[in-house]
Image (cartoon, rainbow, N blue to C red):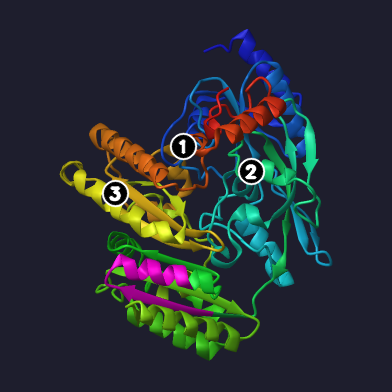
Amino acid sequence: MMATLAETSLTDSLAASGADVLTDEATLDYFAHDIFSRGADLSAVVRPSNKEQLAAAIRAATNAGHAVAPRGGGMSYTGGYTQTAPGTVLFDLAAMDRILEVNEEDMWVRVEAGCTWAALHEKLAPLGLRTPMWGTLSGLKATVGGGMSQNGIFWGTARHGTAVQSCLSLEVALADGTLMQVGKNFMRPYGPDLTGLFLADTGALSMKAEITLRLVREAQANAYASFAFDDRQGLLAASSEIERAGIATECFGFDPHLNAIRMKRDSLASDARQLVGMMKKQGGLLKGLKEGAKVALAGRDFLKDANYSLHVLAEGRNQASADADIAAARQIVAERGGREVENTIPKIIRANPFGPLNSILGPDGERWGPIHCLLPHGGAEAFCAALDDRFARHADAMRNAGVHYGILFAAVGGSGMVVEPCLYWPDASNPLIEETMDKSHRARVPELDANADSWALVQRIKQEIVDLMHDHGAAHFQIGRTYRYRDSLDPAADALLQAVKSHVDPRGLMNPGSLGLAG
């Protein structure tokens, strides 16, 4: 089909920036997906290789009246970059992946937005450095820029909080193509926190061009422990006290459903790459062999009698310090009814922090849709009880439709508990999932047909859970187009947010709909 004059004009204007411009049908379809769903049709995908190209292409798109939206590694599942109206120009920032400067004296690192967490870790590790929160589990694909827009948790989170708390300053591109520096490279905040204004905005206010993050010294020693609990109350109570005590860098757990899914999916004993990585991490051939033998003997059955499981990682300046923190965790767990089990899971994932992203399909090829919230310690159990009731109401319909779930728990330093129910349902995959998964693993997972009934049920249950989270006063990461952020704001604060949006994006063309802000 011959391109229209308007389409040709847009493509030429975008290409004049020097960035790559893609308009073929397969590419536009691929980039219209996130992990959970497909958005509206795109007009073009732009791949800038530097901030000047980014700014010029944004200017060309918005001058032509097109909305623009940023995409990092594409690991969103909340509509962070998928669109509700056709015609958006999507910016794929993967080519802006350079690590621009590592300042070991002043302890900061500056990167382009498309740099992945895994690449940053690889660069900093030989220097004995890292950022305080140093990546998400999806860090093989997930980018630093995406982490600043979406926020996120995992590595370092139990001690250092969320991704954006490690950020010192930003250079952002506004809807008219203006490049703007906010914050200082060595201090945040300086006066009102202008850097924070553009963090966790899901790209509603700007596109991230360059990010400066604080650095800390890499730990000299690590220690690990895993525990089993007969009930959720014990797990939550222990997790909360471990976070309050400040003795863990990561502290996370699984409900019995997620335990079962993980044990079914992961071949912990036979995956040679993970096992070798874990043995190397132990330091010393003899210790590595001993720890490897423990993992092999434990296999996948060490949690078969566990109802809920909790996994704790500690770090220190020396082994005695790390071991002391784990000893304190053992005491906390024992006082709350837990028992220690083989620490296979924390050892394996710490040695392989950015592994293949194979969990975006269930072990039987099911689709995966997480819904998370962050709650204060005192509110986690009440929400979980309400969530139990919600799932019980849908039990028959879920069973008939093949829908099931599992729940992840994680402690966040200085904040509380993440509760993340994950829905699994029989349905066809999508192009993003197919491209993301490790090919050898994908070949072992069944391919399922589209299932409209299960998909409809999942969407209904997801919205009910989002509403339940709102009713319990929860906060969220990667707010996107899913969570009820604006409903939670004081009216005066909401008016301020809209005023900021109007100032930096007067025509409403920067990722319209994100954060619930209309275009």
The extreme bottom residue here reads 286
Distance of mark 3 from mark 2, alpha carbons? 30 Å
* x, y percent for residue 28: 52, 28
Q: Residues within 10 Å of mark 2 (few under 14, many from 20)?
A: many
| Magenta run includes residue 254 | no
Please name which of the two marks, 1 or 2, marks the residue nearer to the observer.
1
| Magenta run includes residue 234 | yes
- Badge number at residue 94: 2
Using the image, determine if residue 128 lies above or below residue 95. Answer: below
Distance of mark 3 from mark 1, alpha carbons? 35 Å
* x, y percent for residue 127: 74, 70
Labels 3 and 1 touching (C-beta < 8 A): no
- Badge number at residue 106: none
- Badge number at residue 446: 3
* x, y percent for residue 88: 58, 24
Looking at numbered disc 3 in the image, what kind of residue is underneath it? Pro
SS class, disc 3: loop
Q: Residues within 10 Å of mark 1 (few under 14, many from 20)?
A: some
Looking at numbered disc 2 in the image, what kind of residue is underneath it? Ala
Name the residue: 20% across, 49% down: 392
Please name which of the two marks, 3 or 1, marks the residue nearer to the observer.
1
Query: Residue 74 versus residue 394: which sits nearer the camera?
Result: 394
Horizontal arrangement in the rendering, residue 329 relative to residue 454 (left or right)? right
Looking at numbered disc 1 in the image, what kind of residue is underneath it? Arg
Q: Earlier in the sequence, mark 3 or mark 2?
A: 2
SS class, disc 1: loop
Residue under numbered circle 1: 484
* x, y percent for residue 277: 52, 73
* Start-end of magenta stretch: 223-241
Residue 231 position by quadrant: bottom left
SS class, disc 2: helix
- How many numbered dots are placed on residues in this image? 3
